[in-house]
Amino acid sequence: MLVPTTRRPSMIADIAAAVEGGMNDSAASSVVVLSGGPGMGKTHTLHRLMDTVTGPARFTCADELSWRMPYAVAAALLGAEITSAPEPGFGDTLLGLVDEMCSAGPLLLVVDDAHHADAASLELLGRLADATADLPLTLLLGRRLLPRRDLLERLVARSSTREWALPPMDGADLAALALDVAGAPVDEHLTALLESAGGNPMHAIALLNDLRRTGELTIVDGVATTTGTDRCAADTETMIAEHLALLDPRAADLTGKLAVWGAPATLSELASIESVRPVTLVAAAQTAIDAGILAIDAAGRLSFTHDLYGDVGYQMLAAPLRTVLHEAIAEQARAHGDHHLLAHHLLAAGRIGPDTLNAVRAAEAQLAHAPAVTVDLFESVGRASTPGASPAPGWHLGLATALARTGQLSRASEVAAEGVAAEGITATADIAELAALLRVRLFALIARGRTDDARALIAETLALPVDDDARAALTDSRDYLGILEGRGPVPSAPFHDAATGPDRSVTGIAAEALRRYLRGEGLDALALAIEATRREGEQSGPTAAHTSAVVWPPLIEQHTHGPSAALALLESATRTRSARGADWMTAYHDFTRGGIELALGRLDDSAASFDTGFERVAAADMGWTSMAHAGRATVDILRGDFAAAAARLDAFSASGLPDQFGIPLITATRAHLLESRRRLRPAAQEATRTWRRAHDMQLYGWLPSSVLLLTRIAVRAGAADLLDALRSDIAEIPRPLPPAATHVELAAAVCAVALDDADPQAVVTAGVAAADAAHTVGDVLAEASACEEAACAAAALGDKHTARDLAIRALSRTQDAGATTDSARLATRLRALGLRMDPNTVRHRPTHGWDSLTATEITVAELIGDGQSGAEIAERLYISPRTVQTHVSHALTKLGLRTRVELAAQVAARRHPADPRA
C-alpha cells in the first residue's frame, strides 16, 4: 500500500509512528518500505528513523555485488558467517537467528538499497514478513524503483506492506540541510540556487561542496551566501563526475577499480588485480578518503560513501578499460573456484559464450540450496545476450529449472515454452535438452493445476516422432495428470504391468501409487509411493526437481494406518525433502501436517501448519490446495467460527482451481458447515452431491474418512434417499479395510437402524469398536464421532448409563481439542433423546494458562526452556522454523507473556517451584 505524502518532516513522523507501531502492536503493519531515486536521501532517512526507535535495531546496506552472493545481505544484517555455497537449510538457520533476537523483545531490521540484495536474501525477507505476524519484528527497507527485482516487488505489493515514496526536499528541508553542511543559515540567493537542484539532497550537498571548493561559498554576518550569481545547479551525476575528476590519477585509478569490483574490497584484493603490493595503493586510498569519496571500515574494506560515486565512476571508465578489469577479476574468481562471481564478471566483460554459460552452470551446482540466486544468474545471461539473438544453448533449460525450484511456476512454464520454440523440432535439435524443457514445462503446468494446458502439451508431444522412452514418460505423465485432476472414475486396472520395473519413470510409479490409494488399496499404494520417493532420490540433473513423489507417502499413510503413523512418516519425508533442496514442496508437507494434526485433535497446531503452508503458496501459484482449504475450514467449523469457514470455502470456489484427485472435499466441508449451522436440509443436499460424486469416481480410499459425517447428516435431516445410497454403496468399499478406516462398519449399522428399524444395540457395539480402533491409530476426532453415534444409540435404547459414559468419552476428546461445535452437537442430539449433558461439566483444556497449551506448544516451550533455538526445535520436531514461531506466538498469548525469555523463565519456574517455606 503506497502512502501519499508531500513533505518530508510529516512523512518521516508518519513512518516513525508506523515503525514504532509495528514493533509494539501485532495488528499494525510490520513491513515498511521507503522508495526513492538515487541521491534522494533514503540512507539518511533510514538512519533518522532508526534513531527514533526505542529498542534494538540492526542495519545493513546492499551493494551492486550483493545479489550475486547467496544470503549475503541477510547474513550481514544478522551477523552470520556465510560461504559462497550455502549449506542446506541455511535460510532456516537465519530465520532461527531472527527468532533468537526477538526472544527478548521487539526488533527492527533495516535494509538499505534492497534493490541490490541477492535473491536468497529477498526470499528470506518475504519469509520474515510472514513471521511478523508471530514475532515482535518490524522490517524497514529502502529501495530504488530500478533495477526492478521481482521478489522485492512481490514483498512491496503485499496488502500488509506500507510504502512511502520519498518526496523532493522543499525549501525548509533544503535550508535545514544547508545549515548542517555550511554551518550557518543560508540567504535567499543560496536557497534559490539549492532549490534549482530539484529537491535532491545528494545534489544539494554536492553543490554546496563544489561552491566551497571554488571559494564561492562565503559566510557574511553569520549567514551563508554565494558569490556565484550566475551559477546554475548541474544535474547530480554531472556534479559527482566533476568531484571525481578532481582526484589525482592514482586515486582515480583506485576508485575505478573499486567501481568495477562492485562491492567493498580491501587494498589486498584491489592490488591483486594487477599483482602489485597493497602498500602501493595506500596514498591513493587516503586521497580518495580525504575527498569524501571513499570510506574504510575496521576490517580494512574500502567502499564508496554513496553508491552514486560508484555508479558514475564506473561509467567514467572507457568501456574497453572496464572490460579489461572485469576479465582480470574474473580470472581471480576462476582461480578461487567462485563460479557465480566468475560468471558475473564474464558477463560484465561482454563475454557471452560457452565459457560464461559453463560458469553459470557450475554456479548452479554450487547454489543447489539457493535456486533464486541461480535464477538471477541465468537472467543476467539473457539480458547480456545480443538483442534479437537466441540465447546460448542450455540457457532456457537452466533458467526454467531454477524458476521451477523456487516455485515460480508461471515463469518456469513460459521460459520452457520459449526454449522449446527456440530449439524447434529439427534434425539438428538437441533432443535431450528439448525433452528436458518439455518436462519442466509439463511439471510447471501440472503443479499450477493447469490441467487442460498440460494435457494439450502431452498430446502435442506424443504426436511428434519421439523415442519409446520419451513416449513412455509422457504416458506416465498423462496418467499422473489424470489421477490428480480426477475428471473421471479412478481406473480399476493398473496403469502398467510392472510398476516398479527398472525402466518405469518416477512419475509412472507415483501415478500407480495414487491410483491404488484412491481405489482403497492402501498398503500397496504406500509401498509404491515409498519406492517412487527412493527412485526420485537416485535422479540427477535438471529433471531431479520435477517430480513430487516425496509428498505422497504421509498422505497415503494417514488413510491407511492413521494420523500417528502418518506423522512419523512425514518426519522422514521432511528430512528427505530438505536434503534434496526441494523447498517448493514445503507447503504441501505443511498441508499434510495440518491434516494429520486435525485428526489428532490438535486444532491450534493444525491451523498453524495450514496457515504456514498458505503463506508459502501465496508466494507461488500452486494449484492443488482444495484439501488444505477444506481442512483449514474444518478447523474453523470445529472452533465455531462459521463465518471464517464460509469465507474460506467461498474463496476457493471462486478461484476456479480444481478439486485434487476429484475428491469433493470442499462440498463435504460445506455440508459440515451447514449442519453446524443447523441447516439440515441444505446440508443433506450437499452431502448427497458429495457422496454421489465420490462414489461415481470410485474414491474408495477417501470414502471411509467421510462416510460417518455424511451418514450423520442424512439421519439428522431424514434424507432417506441418501441413506439408501450410503447403505448400498458402503458394501462396495474394498475389504479388508485398512486400520484407519474405522467408521465404515459403524456407518453401515447406522443406516440399517435408520432404514430397517434394526436394533440400535448394533450401533452401540459398532460405535465402541470404531472408537477403540480410532484411538489405536490416534484419530481423536474419529474416536469422538464414533462415541457420539454410540451414545445416541444407547440413549435411544433407554440405556442412559451407557449413553452417559460414551458421551463423556466423546466430550473429553472434543472439549480437550477445542472442538466446541462437536460438543454442542452431541449435547443437542442427546437432549432430544431425553439425556441432558452439559459439555462444560467435562474437563477440557482451558483457553489461558499452562494447561491451555497444546502438546506441541508444551514441547516447544520445554525446548525453549532447555535453551534450544527455533532452528534447533524445528529440526528436532521436523517442522519449519516458521511453524515453530507460530507455536511460540500461540503459547505466549495463552500465557500472557511477551517474549521467549519470559517463556523460558516460566518453564524454569515450573520445573523448580519455589519452596513456600523459604
Image: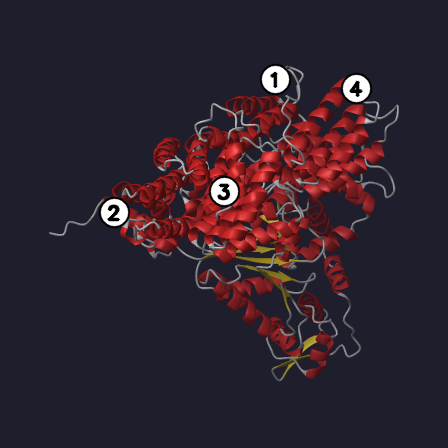
* Apparent side of residue 120 relative to residue 216 in the rendered image (left or right): left
Q: Amino acid at mark 3?
A: Leu
Q: Earlier in the sequence, mark 3 or mark 4?
A: 4
Residue nearest the observer in this picture, 792 or 873: 792
Question: Given contact means CB atoms under 8 Å apart, are the residues at marks 4 and 1 in contact?
Answer: no
Q: Earlier in the sequence, mark 4 or mark 2?
A: 4
Task: Say if residue 57 shows up in the picture.
Answer: no
Residue at 14 percent of width and 52 percent of height: 916
**Mark 3 crowd level (few <14, some 14–19, many ≥20, 10 Å Cα):** many
Q: Which residue is mark 2?
A: 910
Foreground: disc 4 or disc 2: 4
Q: Which residue is mark 1?
A: 500
**Mark 4 crowd level (few <14, some 14–19, many ≥20, 10 Å Cα):** few
Q: Which residue is mark 3?
A: 710
Colour scheme shown: secondary structure
Q: Amino acid at mark 2?
A: Arg
> Which structural element holds mark 2?
helix
Q: Residue 552's image quarter? A: top right
How far is disc 4 from disc 2 in space, using C-alphas? 68 Å
Q: Earlier in the sequence, mark 2 or mark 3?
A: 3
Residue 543 place in picture, x, y as percent: 68, 28
Q: Which mark is residue 467?
A: 4
When the figure is inspected, residue 176 is found, relative to residue 729, above or below; the finding is below
**Mark 2 crowd level (few <14, some 14–19, many ≥20, 10 Å Cα):** few
Q: Residue 140's image quarter? A: bottom right
> Which structural element holds mark 3?
helix
